[in-house]
Structures are given as structure tokens and as C-alpha cells.
Image (cartoon, helix red, strand yellow):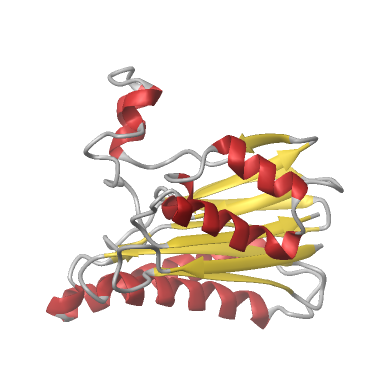
Amino acid sequence: MKISGATNIGNRRSENQDKYIAGRLLNGVSFGFVCDGMGGVKGGEVASGILAKYIEDALFVHNESQTFNHERTVMSAIEDANSAIYNMGNQKAEYHGMGTTVAGVVIDKNQCTVYHAGDSRVYIVRDGMLALITKDHSVVQELLDNNQITAEQAQHHPQKNLITRAVGVSADVDIDVAELEVMPGDILLCATDGLTNFVTPADIVKVLTTDNIFSMPDKLIQKALDNNATDNITAVVLAI
């Protein structure tokens, strides 16, 4: 397993509200998560930071354990982070309404668990083909599902940045969890919308199939910057 990640403030933002965590525990479990914060000047950065820390700390508590329940551990961390973010938002006016997306994976041997809320994404490349594992929780995705707009219209829709699910915006949190089997040669990408809104699937798969894994996140970010990305940009790559 090889893992690499990077984040960039982008061309126009004054702060980076994205966070990512990635690593490999002593017991062989690997993980990668991206979080895209939202809400106020500092609220988004605070929310994404809280969530990333809660997940990372929870996983490393089980650093050497061979039997811990990955899903229960991550979901408990997300729920605790949700409460912390939501309560802070209610207690401090400058943080009111803050929240964060989450998209990430935990890999144990050939089993991969995917966690997702919001419009950050998880992709897999297998045999040179790119597939999107997650489905955006967004207004535009709902319009697409109801055949009210086309995929082309979705690319430039005025409500493109409106998400329908996030961590920390309400007392309860709803996370999509999926399981898939991975095999040698697979490459997983966790990315915020600052990347996926400005880099085409064709360019994503080209980078993920031709570059060294340790340069992949930076190469993807540079492509987004070259395409005048207006958002923070974050990518985590895991190669099986």
C-alpha cells in the first residue's frame, strides 16, 4: 500500500478550509479522508479540522489492534465530531452554521469501507478505467436524478455549490457507508470539489495511471490550478 496526499488554497480563496488525513496503522489498516469545510470566514476551517482530528485520533487508538471494528470506530468519531461542531456553532456566533463534507476510505487487506457526506468524492481506477464510488449530496445531483437538468447543464449550474448533507450542521448526521473489495493495482482517490469541478475525468485517470503515486496529488492539484480553480483543492491517493 502506498499513500500520498496534498492540499492547496487555490487561486482565489484567502484561507484553506480543506483538510485531509492519510496513513497506515501498525496493524496494516490504511486510511485516507478529505474534508471540505463551510461556514463563515473561519468556521469552515474549524469544522473540517475538528472532523479530521476526531477520525484520525480514533483510528490511531487502535494502531496495533488486529480485531477492532473499523466502521464502528469511524462512525463513532464522525458522530462525536458532528456534536462538537454543531454545539460550537450554536455557542459562538462566528461559527454559526459551520459544517464540513467528508469523503474517505479505510482499507483492511482486500476490504475497503467508503464514508461520504456532501460533494467531496471517492473514485477508483481499475484496469485503466475510472469509476465514481460516491454520489454527491447536492442540489444539482437531485436535479440530475429527477431529469430536470442535463449533465452538461450541471457543470455550470448556479446552485452547483449547494450541498444537501454535511457533518456538523444539525444535531444528527447521515453518512453513506459502502463496502467494496479491492485488488492489487487498484488506485483510490479521495478529492474535494475544488479538484473534481476543475479537472476532467479523462485528466484524472491519466494522472492516476501514468504518474508516480507520490506526485499524483500535486499533479492533480496543478491541473485544477491551471484550469483557474476558484476553490481549495485537496487529493488523497491510495495505491493497492
Instruction: Tell me what residue is drawn at x 42 percent, y 76 percent.
Output: 49
Quadrant of residue 23 within the rendered picture: bottom right
Seen in the picture, residue 86 relative to 153 is either above or below; the reply is below
Question: The N terminus appears in which quarter of the rendering?
Answer: bottom right
Seen in the picture, residue 213 relative to 20 is either above or below; the reply is above
Instruction: Tell me what residue is drawn at x 53 percent, y 58 percent.
Output: 221
Q: Looking at the picture, how far across and down is residue 2, in whole percent?
A: 78, 64
Horizontal relation, residue 171 to residue 184: left or right? left
Instruction: Tell me what residue is drawn at x 48 percent, y 46 percent.
Output: 196
Front-lying residue, 125 or 9 = 9
Horizontal relation, residue 204 to residue 182: left or right? left
Quadrant of residue 4 within the rendered picture: bottom right
Q: Looking at the picture, how far across and down is residue 194, in whole percent?
A: 42, 54
Front-lying residue, 21 or 86 = 21
Seen in the picture, residue 187 relative to 102 is either above or below; the reply is above
Q: Looking at the picture, how far across and down is residue 162, in whole percent?
A: 26, 46
Quadrant of residue 108 within the rendered picture: bottom right
Furthest toward the front, the residue is 226
Q: Looking at the picture, how far across and down is residue 132, in whole percent?
A: 58, 38
Horizontal relation, residue 86 to residue 134: left or right? left
Instruction: Tell me what residue is drawn at x 25 percent, y 78 percent.
Output: 88
Q: Is residue 230 visible?
A: yes
Q: Is residue 175 visible?
A: no
